[in-house]
Image: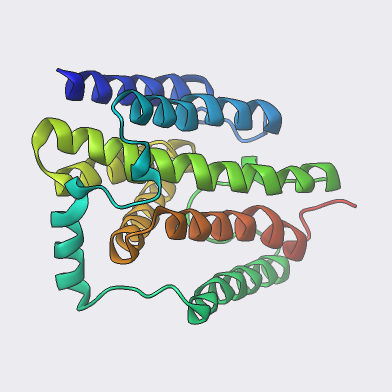
Amino acid sequence: MIALVALTAALGALWAYLRGGVLPVGWTPVRRGPARRLWRQCVWLGGTTLAVLALTGRLNALVALPPEFFPARAAAIRWAGGTIVVDAGALWVVGGIMLGGAMLALAERWRGRPLGLGDVEGLMPRTSAGLLWSVPLSIGAGVNEEAFFRLLLPIAIAWVTGSALAGFAVATALFGIAHRYQGWRGVAATAVSGALLAFVYLLTGQLWTAIALHIAIDLNALMLRPVLSGRVRW
């Protein structure tokens, strides 16, 4: 009963967030201020995650891989051939993300049109003030979305179905759907990135690694890319 209530609460929070927390399909200009977007994200995604974990006595899942995820972790390790050790070498991954973003931005500047998968122009900052909001928005998305889509949804689904793999699969699909305003290419690309973030989480056993990677990806998209591509008007 508690498991079903937890899953219902998680899905209800996601529905409420999608109903008014992101840009609806067809909206290209930013019609919701960044402060409101960040607030709704913290309340519906982050707040629900904390509330459900607290009420079920599972707040420790934020810092330690839940036992429910052990079978999924074992499957991920078998598939990858080993775990991921987080050390100084992991900084190369962040560097690679930034380098890829810089190359894409410079290519956009040279071609004079947006490149890449998905319609994200409505989220791109155009002013220095908007650019400053990219920092809290990126951090908020990294923390709240990873806690919700990589922890709360998978574990709630695992409580109901008994399968963490099913939990991660459904959560990854919903993560893609949550970015439906980017079009079907954006949904597909986001779902793939969500699967990779889940993979990183399982291979490291630490949620903060997925959070840090998510923040790096968003900072790349919302800060580095707009500046280098010439979108921002100073």
Identify which residue, 220 or 142, lies in the foreground.
142
Residue depicted at 71% across the width and 71% down the height? 110
Describe residue 217's horizontal placement relative to residue 132 as left or right.
left
Q: Where residue 55 appears, x then y in whole percent?
A: 33, 23
Q: Where residue 135 appears, x then y in whole percent?
A: 69, 49
Q: Where residue 27 appears, x then y in whole percent?
A: 58, 30
Q: Residue furthest left?
A: 162
Q: Where residue 100 appears, x then y in whole percent?
A: 57, 73
Residue 3 occupies quadrant: top left
Residue depicted at 23% across the width and 33% down the height? 156
Residue depicted at 19% across the width and 20% down the height? 2
- Residue 114, compared with residue 86, is above or below; it is above
- Residue 81, compared with residue 27, is above or below; it is below
- Snapshot colouring: rainbow
Describe residue 16's horizontal placement relative to residue 11 as left or right.
right
Identify which residue, 133 or 85, lies in the foreground.
85
- Residue 160, compared with residue 118, is above or below; it is above
